[in-house]
């Protein structure tokens, strides 16, 4: 359970408390099996290398889950994640330690709903921001 965030307490420019995650082989294989995305670039080193990659890399579902976790951990249980989009510009490979981060871009009233637009991203040590994205959440107003 997360602490509840309220719309009136949010300011443009606020940083979201991010998190870091080492992409170990165990984590990669478990995530691939759990998502049932068995395309070989996510678990077969030889296949990934034959395609020009240095190693296996995380899949779209994992990226989506990491960015969604950033948003939902920040907004609290009574918030609503209305939209999440991202671009996979560079892969995140096994052995990378990635950082998932974000900041508040816009706070506004959307027909009486407490709307917050977020800039979210995933960094790796090789490329910096390799996965930029945006999200919209709706936060409750204080009782």
Image (spheres, rainbow, N blue to C red):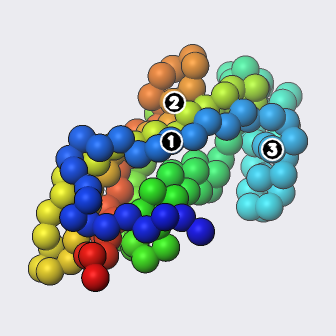
Question: Which residue bears the numbered disc 3?
Answer: 27
Q: Quadrant of the N terminus?
A: bottom right
Q: Which disc is residue 123 wearing?
A: 2
> Residue at (69%, 26%) from the top-left corner?
96
Separation of disc 3 and disc 1 at Cα?
19 Å
> Closer to the camera, 36 or 117?
117
Sequence-first disc among 3 and 1: 1
Sequence-first disc among 3 and 2: 3
Element under disc 3: helix
- Where does residue 27 sit, x and y in percent of width and height? 80, 44
- Where does residue 97 sit, x and y in percent of width and height? 66, 28
Element under disc 1: strand
- Where does residue 57 sit, x and y in percent of width and height? 70, 36
Question: Which residue bears the numbered disc 1?
Answer: 18
Separation of disc 1 and disc 2 at Cα?
11 Å
> Residue at (58%, 51%) from the top-left corner?
66
Density class for disc 2 (Cα within 10 Å; few <14, some 14-19, many ≥20) is: many
């Amino acid at each position: 359970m997360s602490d509840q965030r309220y719309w009136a307490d949010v300011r443009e420019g606020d940083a979201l408390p991010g998190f870091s995650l080492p992409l170990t082989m165990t984590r990669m294989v478990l995530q691939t099996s759990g998502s049932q995305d068995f395309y070989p670039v996510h678990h077969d080193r030889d296949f990934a290398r034959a395609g020009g990659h240095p190693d296996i890399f995380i899949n779209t579902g994992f990226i989506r889950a990491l960015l969604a976790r950033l948003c939902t951990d920040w907004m609290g249980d009574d918030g609503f994640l209305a939209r999440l989009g991202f671009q996979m510009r560079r892969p995140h490979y096994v052995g990378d330690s990635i950082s998932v981060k974000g900041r508040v871009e816009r706070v506004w009233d959307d027909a009486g709903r407490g709307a917050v637009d977020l800039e979210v991203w995933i960094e790796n040590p090789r490329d910096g921001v390799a996965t930029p994205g945006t999200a919209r959440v709706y936060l409750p107003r204080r009782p």
